[in-house]
Image: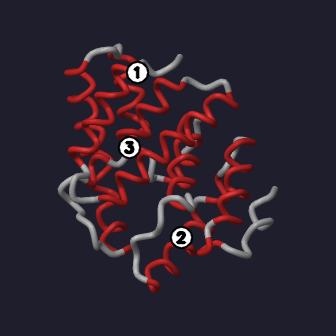
Amino acid sequence: MKLEKKVEEKLLAYIKEIFANDSWTLAHSLSAVGIIKQIAKSEGADEKILATTMYLHDIGYGGLLADGYSFSQRIAAKKEHMPKGAKMARDFLGRIGGYTEEEISQIAHLIEVHDNVDALKTQDELLVLEADSLASIDPKVPFSFSEEDVVKYVDFFLNHRATRFVSKKGKELLEKFSTQNKVFAGMAGKFKK
């Protein structure tokens, strides 16, 4: 099912408000939406559920982080942002309409588990992981971390995220982004299975 334009406009306005002081997470979230739409199309997955999830997946960081945060601060906020974001998403989606209670529950679940990388099992959970991960290395969304934090992030990405990709489109984008993102230069080819 496709995401309706009117609903998508509300989602965009909401995250722009949430991330008014966190430009990287806003850019990351918008990248994740574009990526999940490509993946959903190639996998025959539900764009409405997955794109909504990607718009809202990091809203729990709102108020927890602002521009200039470190990798360690982001990691420390990870556990808190998932349940907080799931609750915020339930409340927001219930107010704007256009979603059934079942759809809201699916979206809230995906938000609540999306960074529990090793516990993800369903196709939708893994596709959300792929879009979230790819948006983190999208060459159009420059890292906001210090050089030292970038090294930590690359290690984290390689060991906890890149190994979990399941979709053909996600793997293609991983290869593409790894060749285009100068931080990941030279890593292309390491992701093929």
Task: State whether residue 102 is above or below residue 72.
Answer: above
- Whole-percent x and y of residue 56? 35, 40
The amino acid marked with disc number 2 is Phe
- Relative image position of residue 163 (x, y in whole percent): 67, 59
Which mark, residue 39? none
C-alpha separation, residue under disc 1 versus residue under disc 2 = 35 Å
Labels 1, 3: front one? 1
Which residue is rendered at x = 52% and y = 59% of the image?
A: 140
Q: Secondary structure at mark 1?
A: helix
* Residue that appears at 66% across and 64% down: 180
**Residue at (68% x, 74% y) in the render:** 185
- Where does residue 74 sit, x and y in percent of width and height? 34, 66
Q: Tell me: residue 146, above or below residue 99.
A: below
What residue would you read off at disc 1? 5
Q: Are marks 1 and 2 in contact (CB under 8 Å)?
A: no
Rendered image quadrant of residue 14 = top left
Residue 109: quarter of image:
top left
Of labels 1 and 3, earlier in sequence is 1
Q: Is residue 155 left or right of residue 188?
A: left
Q: Quadrant of residue 124?
A: top right
53 vs 191, left or right, is left
- Please tell me the numbered disc located at residue 156: 2
What residue does disc 3 label?
A: 57
Give left or right: position of 38 versus 23: right
Q: Earlier in the sequence, mark 1 or mark 2?
A: 1
